[in-house]
Amino acid sequence: MHRLAFVTIIFAFFCNALVAVAQPVAPPKEPRPLGESTGYPLPRFVSLGADPANARTGPGQRYPIKWVYVRRGLPLQVVGEYDTWRQVRDRDGEEGWIHRALLSGTRTAVVTAKDGISLYGEPQGGSEPIAHLGQRVLVKLGQCALDWCAVEGLARGDEGDFDGWVKREALWGLYADEVLE
C-alpha cells in the first residue's frame, strides 16, 4: 500500500513538472480563460524573445507600429490571442500586438521599487545584502516562493552578471500568489 502511494506521488510530481514547463504560470485559485490559439491561460507572463520587436495596434503586419521594444528579456503579460499574434501588456499598462515568434516562455521580472531592492545570498531576511538592484533592473526568475525569488542578472553592456535572492514584492513579472519551481 505504501509503495503504491509513493509511486502515485512521484507520478503526480512529474506530471505537474511537465505542466509547469508547458504553462509557466501557476494555476490561480480560480481558473482563467484559455486562449483560443494556444489553449494556455489568459492572462499569463512571457518575455520578449527578440530585440527590437514591434508592438502593433492590431494583430497583423498591416496594422501600424505602436511601440518598438528594444530590450530582449522584458517581461510582458499576454492578455489576448489571435492566430499567431499575442496581445501583450507591459509594466506601464501599455498594450500592443506582437507576433508569437518574438516572444519567449523564459520568465523574467523587472524591479519596480523606486529605491531598488537588496540582493541576498540566501532567502532570509536576517542575512546580509550582497548587492543592490536599482529600479528597472531586469532579472531572470528562478525558483519563487511566496516571499522570495531566486534571480539571475541578464548581462548587457556594462551590467554585470549576478545571482541571489530578492523579496518578490518589488518585482513585476509574476502574480502575487504564483509559485515557480
Image: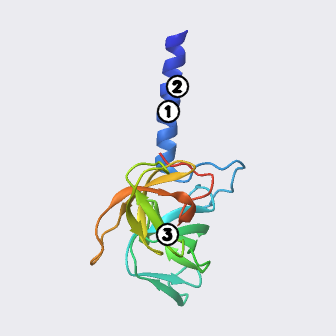
User: Which mark, by number, is residue 133?
Assistant: none
Residue density around tag 2, few if under 14, some if 14–19, many if 20 or more, within 10 Å: few
Q: How many marks?
A: 3
Q: Residue at x 55, y 87 (%)?
A: 63
**C-alpha span from label 1 to label 2:** 6 Å
Tell me if label 1 and label 2 are in contact, CB under 8 Å.
yes
Badge 2 is on which residue?
9
- Residue positioned most to the right: 30
Q: Residue at x 59, y 78 (%)?
A: 92
Residue density around tag 3, few if under 14, some if 14–19, many if 20 or more, within 10 Å: many
Kind of element beneath mark 1: helix
Q: Earlier in the sequence, mark 1 or mark 3?
A: 1
Tell me if label 1 and label 3 are in contact, CB under 8 Å.
no
Q: Position of residue 131 (x, y in %)?
A: 37, 64
**C-alpha span from label 3 to label 2:** 36 Å
Q: Amino acid at mark 2?
A: Ile
**C-alpha span from label 1 to label 3:** 31 Å
Badge 1 is on which residue?
13
Badge 3 is on which residue?
111
Residue 122, placed above or below residue 115: above
Kind of element beneath mark 3: strand
Kind of element beneath mark 2: helix
